[in-house]
């Protein structure tokens, strides 16, 4: 059988693998029942649904013809590296790295760094727009997590707050 759409086929296979991994991983938790769900119930259902959706997409890619075959392009390494790096930088800013003596930099600094690093993943970088987005995200995150949810994690660098 010939693959009609490479993008859909490989996307479907990826969804099926991720869904299967979540469904399999949920087996280590108690499932419970529909009336009294355990910790593994929701990940199991979502994993199975994602796997079924992935298989359906992959099967459709084998049957439904697409003009040009919808070939895979070259892999976009730059966005992948910058987006993953942005998340790692944010995690380091929130928790610090005690093993090397790096104190937490806090939520606000973390969001600014996250936004600037993630913005480098795109093809264009506009400083004013990124600065505006970082400011809005910082203010909204402060009110959502600190004021409304009352979560306890550093907002400012430990060097400033003591």
Image (tube, grey):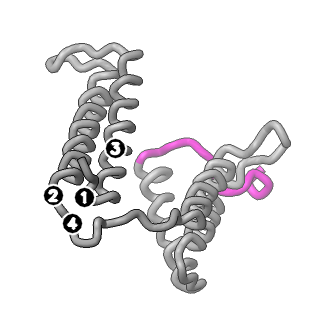
Q: Mark 3 or mark 1, which is nearer to you? A: 1
Residue 151 in the magenta stretch? The answer is: yes
Q: What residue is shown at x 53% (from left), y 65% (from top)? A: 76
**Are the residues at dot 3 and dot 4 in contact (C-beta closer than 8 Å)?**
no
- Mark 4 secondary-structure assignment: loop
Q: Is residue 26 left or right of residue 65?
A: right
Chain part drawn in magenta: 149-162
Residue placed under numbered mark 4 in the picture: 66
Q: Is residue 23 left or right of residue 64?
A: right
Provide residue 95's location: percent of width, then percent of height.
67, 44
- Going 33% across and 58% down the picture, which residue do you hit? 6
Q: Check if residue 120 falls in the magenta segment.
A: no
- The first of marks 3 and 2 along the sequence is 3
Who is closer to the viewer here, 132 or 156? 132
Instruction: Give the mark nearer the N terminus: 2 vs 1.
Output: 1
Mark earlier in primary sequence (3, 4) = 3
The circle on residue 4 is 1
Q: Give the residue furthest to the right.
A: 100
Residue at the location (71% across, 54% down)? 105
């Amino acid at each position: 059988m010939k693959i009609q759409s490479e993008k859909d086929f490989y996307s479907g296979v990826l969804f099926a693998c991720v869904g299967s991994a979540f469904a399999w991983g949920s087996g280590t938790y108690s499932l419970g029942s529909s009336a009294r769900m355990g910790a593994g119930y929701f990940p199991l259902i979502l994993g199975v649904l994602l796997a079924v959706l992935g298989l359906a997409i992959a099967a459709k890619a084998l049957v439904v013809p697409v003009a040009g075959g919808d070939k895979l392009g070259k892999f976009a390494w730059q966005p992948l590296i910058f987006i993953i790096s942005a998340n790692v930088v944010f995690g380091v800013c929130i928790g610090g790295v005690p093993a090397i003596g790096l104190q937490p930099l806090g939520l606000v600094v973390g969001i600014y760094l996250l936004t600037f690093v993630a913005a480098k993943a795109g093809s264009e970088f506009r400083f004013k727009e990124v600065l505006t987005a970082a400011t809005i995200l910082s203010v909204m995150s402060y009110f959502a997590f600190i004021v409304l949810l009352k979560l306890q994690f550093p907002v400012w660098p430990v060097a400033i707050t003591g």
